[in-house]
Image (cartoon, rainbow, N blue to C red):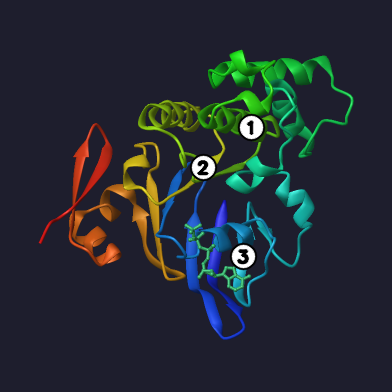
């Protein structure tokens, strides 16, 4: 199993941030993780990456049971693209160097680069349609371009699990669709890593995300096949607001019903 979370809770003082969570992800599935602000998404990702430890329950990621595994080794198999990572990168670094640094999981590039590494980075950038950013510095890139470079960086390490944490934040509708098209092409590859795509927005759930986890107030509200989870009735109950979900070309569009 890629992710196996059983009866996991995380408490901070009086507060239970994650409550009795259960979530299983099988190889070959791509998941969308959907929840409103403060629902516990980041906390859950921190736990999957071994940065926080459950108060109760058991976690196993990529077959590595927490408590019996070297988390630094495990983290090498997980690509995590997030706003927090964006803020750590150096503005003067070129796109190619940032992509290459993914191989060493470093911020900045300090290792000897083999020609094969450079070829691999170029091939990934080609695949993601961002070769034109090879010699551009990070500080001159648009938000959408930065996201593409960060995904290229994550893929350099050949991860088994790729977490994309709200990658469309701050993008206009055209840049969003461009980035989603690129994510679709990554997910559709036969040797693609398992993708967990985190968002607040139903519209970003691509047809390749076969499964969806709804998280609400630190609890798993619903987990299952996207087509079963994203119905008007379920989403109205999830948001506590009457909403209508429409499907078009395999995507879902949400409208808030006026009373
Ligand atoms: N170290 C901590 N100590 C106490 N409370 C915390 C801690 N970390 C997170 N929380 C609380 O847990 C809840 C869930 O936070 P989390 O950041 O996981 O939500 P989120 O779903 O990622 O939100 P957003 O979409 O806004 O990023 C919030 O109420 C937050 O204040």
- For mark 3, give the secondary structure: strand
Looking at the picture, how far across and down is residue 61, in whole percent?
63, 56
Nearer-N-terminus badge (3/2): 3
Looking at the picture, how far across and down is residue 192, in whole percent?
54, 33
Q: Residue furthest front?
A: 140
Give whichever of 181, 176 is nearer the camera: 176
Disc 1/disc 3 C-alpha distance (Å): 24 Å
Q: Is residue 250 above or below residue 26?
A: above
* Residue on which disc 2 sits: 195
Residue name at image x 55 percent, y 58 percent: 42
- Left or right placement of residue 162 versus residue 69 in this view: left
Snapshot quadrant of residue 121: top right
Q: Quadrant of the C terminus?
A: bottom left
Q: Is mark 3 within 8 Å of ligand 1?
A: no
Looking at the picture, how far across and down is residue 90, in whole percent?
74, 34
Q: Is mark 2 within 8 Å of ligand 1?
A: no
- Left or right placement of residue 1 versus residue 113 in this view: left
Does the image show residue 78?
no
Disc 1/disc 2 C-alpha distance (Å): 11 Å
Residue name at image x 48 percent, y 41 percent: 28
Q: Is residue 63 above or below residue 5?
A: above
* Residue on which disc 3 sits: 59
- Badge 1 crowding class, 10 Å Cα cut-off, few under 14, some 14 to 19, many 20 or more, is many
Looking at the picture, how far across and down is residue 62, in whole percent?
63, 51
Does the image show residue 25?
yes
- For mark 1, give the secondary structure: helix
- Left or right placement of residue 174 versus residue 191 in this view: left
Q: Which numbered mark, 3 or 2, is in the foreground of this view?
A: 2
- Picture disc at residue 155: 1
Nearer-N-terminus badge (1/3): 3
């Amino acid at each position: 199993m890629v992710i196996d979370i059983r009866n996991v809770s995380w408490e901070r003082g009086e507060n239970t941030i994650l409550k009795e969570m259960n979530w299983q992800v099988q190889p070959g599935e791509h998941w969308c993780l959907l929840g409103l602000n403060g629902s516990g998404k980041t906390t859950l990702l921190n736990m999957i990456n071994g940065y926080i430890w459950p108060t109760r329950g058991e976690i196993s990621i990529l077959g590595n049971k927490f408590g019996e595994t070297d988390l630094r080794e495990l983290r090498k198999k997980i690509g995590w693209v997030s706003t927090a990572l964006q803020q750590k990168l150096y503005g003067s670094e070129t796109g190619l160097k940032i992509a290459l640094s993914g191989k060493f999981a470093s911020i900045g590039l300090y290792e000897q680069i083999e020609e094969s590494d450079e070829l691999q980075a170029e091939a990934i950038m080609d695949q993601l349609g961002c070769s034109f950013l090879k010699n551009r510095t990070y500080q001159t890139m648009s938000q959408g371009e930065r996201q593409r470079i960060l995904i290229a960086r994550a893929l350099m390490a050949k991860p088994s699990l790729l977490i994309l944490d709200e990658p469309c934040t701050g993008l206009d509708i055209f840049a969003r669709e461009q980035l989603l098209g690129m994510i679709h092409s990554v997910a559709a590859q036969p040797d693609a890593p398992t993708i967990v795509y985190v968002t607040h927005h139903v519209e970003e759930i691509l047809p390749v995300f076969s499964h969806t986890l709804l998280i609400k107030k630190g609890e798993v509200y619903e987990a299952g096949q996207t087509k079963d989870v994203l119905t008007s009735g379920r989403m109205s109950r999830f948001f506590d607001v009457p909403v209508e979900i429409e499907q078009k070309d395999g995507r879902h569009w949400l409208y808030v019903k006026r009373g």
